[in-house]
Image (cartoon, rainbow, N blue to C red):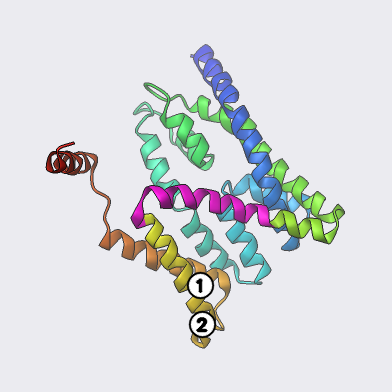
Amino acid sequence: MKNQNKNAFINGLRDGIPIAMGYFAVAFSLGIVAKKAGLNPIQGFISSMLNHASAGEYAEFTVIMANAPYVEMAFVILITNMRYLLMSCALSQKFQPDTSFAHRFFVGFGITDEIFGISIGRPGILNPYYNYGAMFIALPGWSMGTALGIVAGNILPVSVVSALSVALYGMFVAIMIPASKQNKVVGGVVAVSFAVSYAVSKISLFENMSDSMKISLLTVIIAAAAAVLFPVKPEDESQEDEKKGISQYGT
């Protein structure tokens, strides 16, 4: 059993190396934003060790810059990181039924999009030590990137810091554009989100509401509306629709 756990840890460590490298680059730009929020390198490092999501941390730093209360910060991070609840439920199905609560808890704590991807793709039963190996290398890479980004923000000229802070927005755009091109519904939701966000920023009724709370509420409302109006079909129904389309056009 010890050899199995050791091998699983080493495999996770190996698969986590490219993830750590990617995390470092993204987190460096996030560190620039953290510096603007007033965090020092140690605070940035701890923040990234406890919050493993670029969108979640960006929302966190936005709340800090807005001097919003802790309750609002908790709500914002809950909304932006809610997808990890679903990932945790899916990943738990790959464990042995007798896997302890402690293993499930710590694996759930370290779930990110990328670690979930390599874990769910493992054939057969998942050994928690595989996740521990990936987390052992990937999460410090994320945290070090944030800390060094803050250090760079304290050293580099203001113009360079301003330019680097745009990199994180570029990452979000890089995530949205392919999904929007692939799915018209996603593209429409993104367009509506931009339009509604701009409209809300100009309405005096919402002047006393912080930007982070506006974003959170709009995220919930628009996502819920899209889920009701455009529910995702199960794979078998989608395949049947494709077959109907093919037979209709004779191709």
Q: Position of residue 231 (x, y in %)?
A: 26, 55
Magenta region includes residue 239 = no
Location of residue 70 by image quarter: bottom right
Residue at 49% x, 87% y is: 205
Task: Answer with left or right where residue 229 lies relative to residue 156.
Answer: left
Residue at 36% x, 38% y is: 90
Front-lying residue, 196 or 68: 196
Q: Are marks 2 and 1 in contact (CB under 8 Å)?
A: yes
**What's drawn in magenta, residue-wise?**
166-185
Pointer 1: what residue? 214
Residue extending farthest to the front is 250
Instruction: For mark 2, give the secondary structure.
Output: helix
Residue extending farthest to the top is 3
Residue at 61% x, 30% y is: 18
Front-lying residue, 139 or 183: 183
Density class for disc 1 (Cα within 10 Å; few <14, some 14-19, many ≥20) is some
Q: CA distance from mark 2 to mark 1?
A: 8 Å
Density class for disc 2 (Cα within 10 Å; few <14, some 14-19, many ≥20) is few
Kind of residue at badge 1: Lys
Q: Main secondary structure of the magenta part?
A: helix
Q: Position of residue 20 (x, y in %)?
A: 63, 34
Check the image and report above or below for 77 versus 1.
below
Give the quarter of the figure containing the C terminus. top left
Check the image and report above or below for 5 versus 140.
above
Pointer 2: what residue? 206
Location of residue 229 by image quarter: bottom left
Magenta region includes residue 180 = yes
Residue at 61% x, 48% y is: 50
Q: Is residue 106 visible?
A: no
Kind of residue at badge 2: Phe
Between discs 2 and 1, the one toward the N terminus: 2
